[in-house]
Image (cartoon, rainbow, N blue to C red):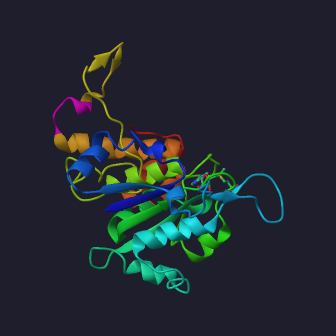
């Protein structure tokens, strides 16, 4: 997977991609990350990337020309060629058969990013171009004519799209084949099977009078698996009950959760 990040603050990204799994994925060639300064896609003397909004009002807006020029340079599209059907054009840009290039605008107005979105990008794309907005945002013609996906990382407003871009690079990378130490590591992560992850414990078995659940020390794998499944169900019931509606649960599990909801826990 190749990530191209378009930003007016390229220095923002010095550091975050140099650690842990992301660093290893880069070293192993699983991902490639390129940071592009939007100002280098301007032709004027002062490298202006923003301007005042038409109609008046506060703040500045990122101009369309540098963003279009940057994306078209990266994808090899020529100006105007893809405007009628930009989504279809970008779908052919991927360097692996059948995979597409996503042109993503980070925006609080976008589709909410979640584990399912991360999985879709990880499996469907060979390249993601991430456009980081600033100020009041970007000229709407970018949204209407250039991007394939407008993505938000949550219902709050940040100062820029750089942090959301990092979130997406991180969440997508760890789902790529071989990015995690073991292929199964992501399987039990929160949201992967519709539930939150089960609680984790490590040594010491006793810390300040707080003892690790005995079943985890006993070495009985089936018992541990049963405990973990129930603990994941309980944690989800407590923290994110909304997830249970869509999770794939057995009849027994649904009955057990009902008993707990009705104040009759058999834990
Ligand atoms: N005026 C915009 C609005 O109210 O929708 C907010 C602009 S925000 C201050 C500047 C930039 O930060 C946005 O263009 C976007 O790139 C990024 N941004 C802010 N919050 C975000 C979020 N929740 N998800 C993704 N990007 C966000």
Task: Say which residue appears at 69% left-offset and 55% top-offset.
Answer: 136
Residue 109 point in image, percent of width and height: 64, 61
| Residue 26 on image: x %, y % | 27, 51
- Whether 106 is among the magenta residues is no
Q: Residue 48 is drawn in which quadrant?
A: bottom right
Q: Main secondary structure of the magenta part?
A: loop
Residue extending farthest top:
208
In this picture, is 72 found above or below 2? below
**Is residue 260 in view?**
no
Along the line of sight, the residue nearer the viewer: 238 or 70:
70
Q: Is residue 108 above or below residue 66?
A: above
Q: Quadrant of the N terminus?
A: bottom left
The number of numbered badges drawn on the structure is: 0
Regarding residue 93, the answer to whether it shows in the image is yes
Q: Position of residue 234 (x, y in %)?
A: 43, 43
Q: Nearer the viewer, residue 201 or 181?
A: 181
Q: Quick check: 173 above or below 20?
A: below
Start and end of the magenta stretch? 215-220
| Towards the viewer: 89 or 75 | 75
Viewport quadrant of the C terminus: top left
């Amino acid at each position: 997977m190749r990530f191209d990040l378009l930003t007016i603050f390229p220095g923002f990204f010095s550091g975050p991609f140099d650690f842990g799994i992301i660093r290893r994925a880069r070293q192993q060639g699983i991902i490639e990350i390129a940071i592009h300064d939007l100002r280098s896609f301007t032709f004027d003397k002062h490298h202006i990337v923003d301007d005042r909004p038409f109609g008046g009002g506060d703040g500045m807006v990122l101009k369309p020309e540098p963003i279009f020029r940057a994306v078209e340079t990266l994808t090899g599209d020529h100006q105007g060629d893809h405007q009628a059907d930009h989504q279809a054009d970008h779908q052919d840009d991927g360097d692996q058969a059948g995979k597409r290039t996503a042109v993503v605008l980070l925006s609080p107005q976008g589709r909410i990013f979640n584990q399912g979105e991360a999985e879709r990008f990880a499996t469907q794309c060979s390249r993601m171009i991430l456009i980081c907005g600033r100020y009041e945002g970007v000229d709407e013609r970018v949204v209407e004519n250039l991007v394939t996906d407008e993505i938000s990382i949550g219902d709050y407003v940040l100062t820029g799209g750089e942090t959301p871009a990092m979130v997406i690079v991180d969440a997508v990378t760890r789902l790529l084949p071989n990015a995690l130490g073991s292929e199964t590591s992501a399987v039990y992560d929160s949201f992967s099977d519709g539930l939150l992850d089960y609680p984790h414990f490590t040594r010491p078995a006793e810390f300040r009078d707080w003892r690790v659940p005995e079943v985890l020390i006993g070495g009985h794998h089936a018992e541990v698996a049963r405990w973990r499944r129930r603990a994941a169900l309980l944690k989800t019931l407590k923290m994110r009950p909304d997830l249970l509606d869509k999770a794939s649960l057995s009849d027994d599990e649904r009955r057990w959760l009902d008993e707990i909801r009705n104040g009759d826990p058999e834990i």
